[in-house]
Structures are given as structure tokens and as C-alpha cells.
């Protein structure tokens, strides 16, 4: 299964990556499963684990860890943003 992953703001800076195209096994079928695969990459990627304040979106819609992902989807991870 192939899809695009985007990283925004301080997350992009700490990972040194703005976007990537991933091809993963079909059992990586939710945001939570994707977070686990990415977090296994190492220390900087641990920000994607539960308990860290990083939100996700699938195809530009905010999504929880149980949200499904499918081939061709665009998944984005980003820290909460404040403004005024």
C-alpha cells in the first residue's frame, strides 16, 4: 500500500523531513498503526507515539488513531497550532 505522509511545523524541523511516499504492508491500515511503524525509526520519531501532542489528518480531515488509511491517501502529522 502506497501513500504520502506530510510533516509540519516543529515536527518537520525535528525529523528533517517535510514529506515522503511510503509503501507499507496492508496491515498498516490505521493512523495508529502508521504511528507505530514511524516511531520504530528511532528517537526523533518518538514524538509520534501516544502521549505526545501530535495530531493527524487523512486527506485534509482531522483523524484519530483509529481512522483508517488506504492506498493513495495523504496523511499529515502536525503539532497543535495556536494563533491570535
Image (cartoon, helix red, strand yellow):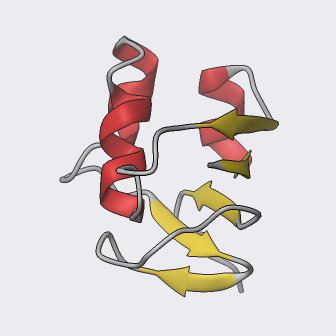
Q: Which sits in the foreground, 75 or 84?
A: 75
Position of 66 relative to 1 (above/below): below
Position in image of residue 32 (x %, y %): 31, 58
Residue drawn at x 76%, y 63% is: 72
**Is 62 located above or below residue 2 in the figure?**
below
In the displayed structure, does residue 26 sit left or right of residue 53? right
Q: Is residue 7 visible?
A: no
Q: Is residue 51 left or right of residue 83?
A: left
Q: Position of residue 71 (x, y in %)?
A: 67, 61
* Left or right of 28 on screen, residue 23: right
Residue at x 59% of width, y 67% of height: 70
Residue 54 vs residue 19: left or right? Answer: left
Which one is nearer the viewer's eye here, 54 or 38? 38
Count of residue discs: 0
Q: Residue at x 27, y 43 (%)?
A: 49
To which quarter of the image does residue 19 belong?
top right
Q: Position of residue 53 (x, y in %)?
A: 35, 58
Amino acid at each position: 500500500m502506497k501513500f504520502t505522509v506530510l510533516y509540519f511545523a516543529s515536527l518537520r524541523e525535528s525529523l528533517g523531513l517535510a514529506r515522503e511516499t511510503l509503501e507499507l504492508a496492508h496491515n498498516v491500515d490505521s493512523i495508529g498503526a502508521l504511528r507505530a511503524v514511524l516511531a520504530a525509526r528511532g528517537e526523533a520519531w518518538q514524538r509520534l507515539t501516544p502521549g505526545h501532542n501530535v495530531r493527524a489528518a487523512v486527506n485534509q480531515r482531522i483523524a484519530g488513531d483509529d481512522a483508517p488509511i488506504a492506498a493513495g491517501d495523504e496523511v499529515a502529522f502536525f503539532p497543535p497550532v495556536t494563533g491570535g
